[in-house]
Amino acid sequence: MLKDITLGQFFPGNTIVHRLDARTKLILVVVYIAALFQATGWISYLAVTAATFSCMYLSRIHPKNMFRGLKPMIFIIVLTAVLNIFYTTGTPVLPGWPITWEGIERAVQMILRIILLITGTFLLTYTTSPIALTDGLEKLFNPLKKIKLPVHEMTIMMSMALRFIPTLIEETDKIMSAQKARGADFETGNLIQRAKAMLPILVPLFVSAFRRADELAVAMESRCYHGGEGRTRMKMLKMQFRDWAALVIGVGFLAMMIVMKKFGL
């Protein structure tokens, strides 16, 4: 299950999605989320699904890698479906049943919304390197420097946190394998017993995380890192025609979704 968590991973490539400016992709993710939450009918959900799979095709990210990240969210997806099925009023499927046709429709739409939200936002980290993501966030938040906000420090912390998610997951998997080899049992018992069995993993995981953080701090200091003041970049971000075209398409898609919501599509 831990190996199925793909948040923070980057798949290098030379597709048009990979070549887009990081700022463009960040803005498009916000536009995508806004468009997704405008969906109310099946036609609008179909439009968002088509847009998501089109981006996956253009980025050459295999659907297997994309949907693998959904496995840790199965519990939330199932819980959302159950709540919508049993707590949505309407026409009962059978007389006397608490399940309604409206509840089933609502549950399917909410499941589809969660899946599209996760897969759509994962495309950002899959196609953008951590360095480009940091530079893009810093450029977008650059106006906040006028009110003395430490923009560079904030963006570098977010980028490092995102980057170390796969590393900590791999470390957790190694610790669990070592504990199982010594007789630990993480798969039997009820939910509370399984949670208690996970406690011995937390101590070595925190020790490993603090050790990695200390090593990273020493490495940054040894390279004379002193924040964003006077910092130069090897690759400068530059908006090109494909970026402006992608933004126009994204804004047009959002406008279309707003119109479809107005007409109940």
Image: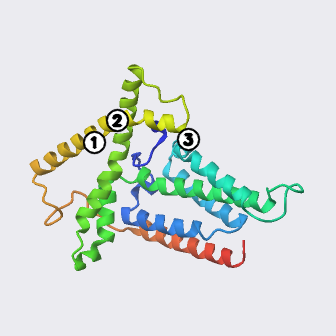
**In screen coordinates, is 231 left or right of 155?**
left
Q: Residue at x 35, y 52 (%)?
A: 162
Does 33 appear above or below 204? below
Q: Can residue 1 be seen in this view?
A: no
Query: Residue 137's x, y, as percent?
Result: 33, 65
Asked if labels 1 and 2 touch by Cβ distance under 8 angstroms, the answer is yes
Number of other residues with Cα within 10 Å of mark 3, as a class: few under 14, some 14 to 19, many 20 or more: few
Q: Is mark 2 on a helix, strand or loop?
A: helix
Residue assigned mark 2: 171
Nearest the viewer among 170 and 238 is 170
Nearest the viewer among 154 and 243 is 154
Residue 209: image tag: 1
Q: Which residue is drawn at 72% across and 71% down?
A: 265
Residue 64: image tag: 3
Residue type, label 3:
Lys
Where residue 180 sits, quadrant-wise, is top left
Q: Is mark 3 on a helix, strand or loop?
A: helix
Q: How far apart are marks 2 and 1 (CA)?
A: 9 Å
Q: In terms of sequence position, does the residue under pointer 2 or pointer 3 come before the other?
A: 3
Residue type, label 2:
Glu
Q: Distance between the residues labelled 2 and 3?
A: 23 Å
